[in-house]
Image (spheres, rainbow, N blue to C red):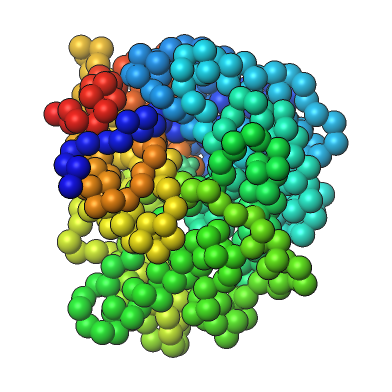
Amino acid sequence: MNKNKFPKGFLWGASTSAYQVEGAAYEDGKKKSQQDILNEEYYNKYGFATAEIASDHYHHYKEDIALMKEMGFTTYRFSISWSRVFPDGVGEVNLKGIEFYHNLIDELLANGIEPIVTIYHYDLPWALIEKYNGWLNRQIVSDFEYYARYIITEFKDKVKYWTTINEQSIIVQYWTKKNYIPEELRSDDQLRYQANHYMNLAHAIACKLVHEIVPGGMVGSAIGYSPVYPLSSRAEDVMAAQNANDLHNTYYLDIYFKGIYTKSAMTYLESNGLAPIIEPGDMELIKEGESDFLALNYYLSECAKACSNDGQRRFMGVNITGVKGAIDGFERQPGFYQMCKNPNLDTNDWDWPIDPTGLEYILRDIYTRYNKPLMITENGLGAYDEFTSDGKIHDLYRIDYLRNHIKSVKKAIDYGVEVIAYCPWSAIDLLSTTNGVKKRYGLVYVDRTDEDAKECKRIRKDSFHWYKKVIESNGENLD
Ligand code: BGP
């Protein structure tokens, strides 16, 4: 075993997404995305920051890249905002938007940082919601192609690594948080899987485009992936965990790597009236969209137990308040599985279980099944950080979390898994998808609150200095 060594040329960096970090939501020609609207709703309901300023990365990108360089990043994963490039979703391109991404990418390349670009990270142009309800309508597939073709062509000589759609499985679970869904359609669960089918088509198209347009380009999906453990060793619970893994995880990976829908998961969906309508030619297209790698977003593991046939279906709950234990329920698929709390794991304040071993487990499991290179494009701890009187942020809990997860990556590599990148979430503090800016993930502190955007001053956290040493030693020094 090649104990404790990351391969030479291993990509070290961190991640962000456009709407969570950029701000400048209505500047230089950008129009609204569905996330601008959803976050306005969170502001009105809970007082969370909107996406209007976020971390103001649009105006601070040079400083942010300088900080990345200081940490020794060799990669940076970020997304392009569709509504900055095409404010109306399709049609006329916004040259100012394109200019921003050229500047950003040029700055990265000048600093020796390899860009990993996500084509779509939750922020669909609002214009396409107004036109036809976005991902609920098949028209989205050709509009996505229009957008993807444009940006892939535009950046083909500068960007080698592309990820297609961020976290399809999470979009299905947290349906109304990641999409604007009109009130009257929210209870129609079949639409979740229908929209996912359109995303599968869009993903396949993007894979084909990268292979066709980008010299030496590599492409894959970025999936939010949590292993599901059985609550007990009772055979019924083990079976329930298998069911949950099939519907939550394999249902997506089989599409990316085998071009098929997992039989057991599809059978369950069909017998419950949830299966997507598949048109002639769809599965052929999906097969043609080959992935070169899988990008994994790993935060937590889940737990399942047997579930009776009766009772209501429900999807995963969220904890809005950031008080441990306030999660508003777990997913339940009658006759298939009931998700539940894992009594063996501690959680963060938003009820996300902390499980470094789960990362080794999925890396080994996925590599064994699909034999493709893996990237970690998200992994991190959402926490309340304190800006202390010494002008610092002593986020030792974050260091601990990242250290233990990097150890797990190492172990998986020792067992022969091909991992090519590690990008924790997030490079700098940013807007959480459902919890405002007080739930922080960054290696760099952004001085703002939900109530007051202030100057968004950047401050190095203790985790910044620690991660710098990790990168310097190519993952050998984790102290
Ligand atoms: C992933 C998303 C990210 C990110 C992260 C943390 O699911 O890809 O966009 O935000 O989770 O989640 P949250 O912001 O809800 O804490």
> Where residue 186 appears, x then y in whole percent?
63, 63
Above or below residue 412? Residue 385 is above
Residue 28, compared with residue 182, is above or below; it is: above
- Most distant residue in the bottom direction: 309
- Rendered position, 409 above or below 436: below
Q: In this orientation, which residue lies closer to the viewer: 463 or 29?
A: 463
Image quarter where the C terminus lies is: top left
What residue is shown at x 76% (from left), y 68% (from top)?
Answer: 281
- Single out the residue that lies furthest toward the right: 91
| Horizontal relation, residue 60 to residue 329: left or right | right
Q: Residue at x 71, y 23 (%)?
A: 98
- Residue 40 can be seen, yes or no: no
Expressed as whole percent of the image width and height from the top left, the position of residue 341 reads 27, 64
Q: How many marks?
A: 0
Image quarter where ligand 1 lies: top left
Residue 140 seen anywhere in this rendered image of the structure: yes
Return the x and y of residue 87 as percentages of the image width and height: 76, 32
Q: Is residue 336 above or below residue 418?
A: below
Q: Residue at x 40, y 71 (%)?
A: 244
Residue at 47 percent across and 14 percent down: it is 111
Residue 327 in the image, given as x and y percentages of width and height: 35, 57
Residue 248 appears left or right of 89: left
